[in-house]
Structures are given as structure tokens and as C-alpha cells.
Image (cartoon, grey):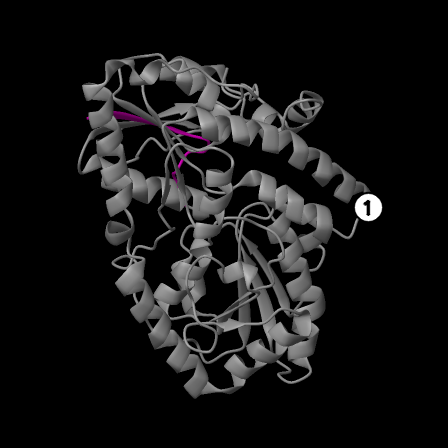
Amino acid sequence: MKLLVAAFDTPLPAHGGSRLRMLHLTRQLALAADVEMVALGPVPPDADEPFPIVGVPRRASRVGALARSLHRPYLAAKLRSPGIAAQLRRRDWDVVQVTTPFFVPAARRSGVPIVLDAHNVETEIFRTLATSDTRLAHRVRWRWEAAKTERAERAAFEAVDAVVVTSDADAAIVEGWGAREVVVVPNGVDCLGIHHRPPDAGATLLYVGQYRYRPNEAAAIELIDEVLPRVRNRVRDAGVRLVGRDPTRALTRRASPSVEVAGEVDDIRPHLRTARALVLPLRAGSGTRLKVLEALAAGLPVVSTPLGVSGLGLRHGEDVLVGQTAAELADLAAAVVADLELAERLSYAGRALVERRYDWPIVAVPFVDLHERVAEQSWNSPSASTRGLRGRGTQEAAS
């Protein structure tokens, strides 16, 4: 099986949930197929992966994407790449996998079956932001973006041969929008690469994310402004550490002796080992969160809103602690800091769960099976890949 993976971001260095998902699932595919990846962004010259990665320069600036997004989704304009489109036409593939719906029009021109690995349902993120953002002008913008994005995502989901999603909730949406086949492949974690240890004895509350992504920025602000002061009323030395790419000005200006904005790091594991809990006041988003699985694998207790741990089958009081309001999250975080027995019980339960259910070789089995099945169907039915885009005119991000 010859397989091309068209990725909206380079997976190296593997910082952040989307990069980790692309990297580990493609590694598993490379055990069963002749795989090549083409990705937006630079590829490190010392990349040592079991598949070649071709980097395509990014052309669209943020300002330019905004200017072109009057009638198309902003993400479609931002990800527009003639270079990706040219790579998709470069040779004969048995299957093309894309990691964003906005590459689907260009992928259709390859004339072969397409699998779309939908990391999120982007429309749902914008809808949530339209109700949760405290800024009126931004709520209007999110509603407008949701309407444009829904048209594009619906068309992409209908046009491909199969859609992969990370949760049952996303599967229900995609099936309702007319996808031919939907397979749930949850996010996973590298259990061999992350060693377990009981949580640190300190009082550091960790948040991990890519902060240009508005739900992460909003969650980090809530952690600093609303959760931390309540925890400090009970634990005077409690503090927050923010780790991840692109901390915004709204976050950096909140840095203080009790708030560390660490930014992007080469290795998340030391930060998982020197925190007391991962705290996720997430109010918007789709899919499932790899940061939760990494924390559980490392033995770090997780305190989260229901959305932050949605789709992972985690049990409140058994695997994680779940609260809805900032006050509830603060109470739970303070309890984890104060109660060593509780922290250690959560630590061992979380590690056992991810080993049993979310190690990447386990997670990837239906993913690899799907690609093999789609390729086999193509070989047996040469006309199966002649369908064009139907109906709704999705924006051609990669053309």
C-alpha cells in the first residue's frame, strides 16, 4: 500500500497534541505501508522517522488569511497551499490521508480514495466560542466563522471515503453531516516514552497548550485569575506554570512570582514530573486532549472541567477530578495538593488506565485497518475514486 499523508503542520518537533497525533499514527501506518508525509512548515534536517517528510513553506500570513476569509473559513485561507496541492499530484498513491478538511478539494484531484483524520470538528469549536467568549464583537465573529466553517466541513465529510474522529461525540456530528464511513480513533500516549512516578510534593498547578488557540488562552486566563487565588487562600505557596507554544500578551503580562509562563519547551516530561496537578478550566473545544493522557501516563493528577476530559471515558473520583465552575476546580486542586493519599491514588489509577486503553500501538489498530480496507476496496473497484466534490462547494485551501 502506497500512502501519502498531507499534514497541516510539520510533526517535528513533536510539541502539542496535533503534532503528536500525526507523528504517532503515521509511525504505526509505516509499519504496514509505504508511507510518505508532506507537511506545511519546515522539517528538521536531522529528522529520523520511518517515513520521509517533505516540508512545504507556509505562504499565508495571518493578515493575508483574514483578508481572504470574507466568504471562506479563516482556517481554509490560512492553510491555502499550492505546494501541498502539487505534492498531492506528484505520483500514484493507493490512499491519500489528509489531516484537515481544507485539504480535501486538492486531495480529490489525486483521483484516489481519501481518508480524513479530523482532529476536531472545527465548527463546534467556533460555536462554543460564540457562546463562551466574554467579548461581544468576538462572539459575533465566532458565529460568522462557524457558519462558513460548517459549510466547508459538511462538504469535505461527504466527499471523502472515510472520516476518522477522536470521540463518539464528534462521530455523531460527522455521521449526521453525511459522511460515508466514520471510525473513532482516540488520541493516545507513548507509554514507553513517558515513565510513571508519583506526583511532586509541591503545589504547582500546570497547564499545557498552544496559546494562539483561543480555548487554551481562555482556560489559562481562568486558571490564573479565578482558580489560583482561591487555591492560594488555602495553600499559600500554590502557583501556576504555563507550558506551550505562543503564549499571548494577555498571558505574559500575568507573569508573577506565583505565575510562571515557561513557553515552548523541548521536553514536556520534566514539567509533568515537577507539578502537583494538571488543571484544565477548558470551556471550548472539540475532540479529546492529548495533554490529559500525557499527564495520566506520567502519574500527574488531572483536575478538569467535563469538556477537558470529554471523550476519554474517565471517571470522576477514580481516574480524574471533575468540576464545572472555577470555585469547584479550585476546591479540587487544593484537595489534591493537601491530600497525598488522594494524589497518589489518582496517579496510579491514571497510569493503569492509559496503559490499558490509550497506548499508541493499541489506539492505532483500527486506524491502520481502515487504510488497508480503503486501499483494498480501491484495488477491487477502480471506479470508486472518480467521485467529485458534491454540492456545497468547500473552500479550496490547498489549491
Image coordinates of residue 376 in percent, x first then y, are 20, 26
The residue positioned 42% from the left and 67% from the top of the image is 314
Q: Nearer the viewer, residue 154 or 86?
A: 154
Q: Nearer the viewer, residue 190 or 166?
A: 166
Q: Is residue 4 visible?
A: yes
Residue 207 figure quarter = bottom right
Q: Is residue 170 above or below residue 87?
A: below
- At numbered mark 1, what does the secondary structure look like: helix, strand or loop? helix
Q: Is residue 307 left or right of residue 67?
A: left
Residue 222 figure quarter = bottom right
- Magenta segment: does it hold 4? yes
Other residues around mark 1 within 10 Å, as few (<14) / some (14–19) / many (≥20):
few
- Magenta segment: does it hold 80? no
Q: Amino acid at mark 1?
A: Leu
- For label 1, the residue is 136
The residue positioned 36% from the left and 14% from the top of the image is 110
Q: Is residue 144 left or right of residue 114?
A: right
Image coordinates of residue 274 in percent, x first then y, are 45, 70
Provide the residue span drawn in magenta: 1-14
